[in-house]
Each structure stands twice: as C-alpha cells, then as structure tokens.
Amino acid sequence: MKLRLDADACEGHGRCYMLAPEIFDEDERGHCRLRREQVPPDLETQARIGVDSCPEGALALDPD
Ligand code: SF4
C-alpha cells in the first residue's frame, strides 16, 4: 500500500501522528509529515487507523 498526503488540506490536528507514530510524524508547525510512503504489510493496520482519523481527508492509502 502507498500513502498520499495532501499537505494543503492538512490543518495540523495531529491525530494521525498520535495514533500511528510509526507512519506519521509532525513538522515544525504540527502538520503531518510522512515517515514513509510505502507501507509494509505489518504496518497497514496502523496506516489505515491514521488515514481514517484525519478529519480533513488529507490522507489516503492506495493499493500498489
Ligand atoms: S490528522 Fe489530518 S489534518 Fe491532522 S495532522 Fe494528520 S494529516 Fe494533518
């Protein structure tokens, strides 16, 4: 699976990196930064939780 971040849509709520810290990180403004774009199978559940937690719809998880 591959992650996409729409940086313009991110408002910095921080839910993604609080719920899925192995996948998402924060930048100096508290906005999301992807730790990785390609998600290995063992982290797919965590990635999905982070994507689904975003109230702005700024994150997406696509099949390879
Ligand atoms: S949950 Fe969404 S809006 Fe909040 S930091 Fe993550 S990507 Fe940005």
Image (tube, rainbow, N blue to C red):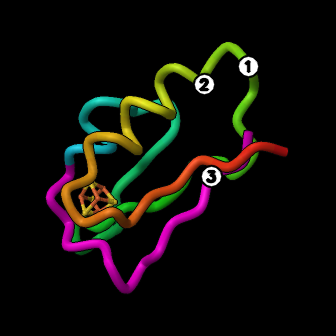
Q: Earlier in the sequence, mark 1 or mark 3?
A: 3
Which residue corresponds to the image point at 20% horizontal and 73% vertical from the top-left?
11
In the image, taking residue 46 as reference, residue 8 lies left or right, namely left
- The residue sitting at the bottom extreme is 8
| Amino acid marked by disc 2 | Glu
Side (left or right) of 24 relative to 14: right
* Near-viewer residue (15 or 48): 48
Residue with the most extreme right position: 64
Q: Distance between the residues labelled 1 and 2?
A: 5 Å
The alpha-carbon separation of the residues under discs 1 and 3 comes to 13 Å
Residue indicated by mark 2: 44
Q: Which residue is drawn at 52% across and 55% down?
A: 60
Q: Do the residues labelled 1 and 2 touch (CB within 8 Å)?
A: yes
Which stretch did the figure color magenta? 1-14
Q: Distance between the residues labelled 3 and 2?
A: 10 Å
Residue 6 within the segment the image draws in magenta: yes
Secondary element at image label 3: strand
Please, which residue is most extreme toward the top here?
Answer: 42
Q: In which quarter of the image is the N terminus?
A: top right
User: In the image, residue 52 lies at what x, y percent?
Assistant: 34, 41
Q: Which residue is drawn at 69% across and 52% down?
A: 37
- Residue wearing tag 1: 41
Where residue 43 sits in the image (x, y, percent)? 61, 21
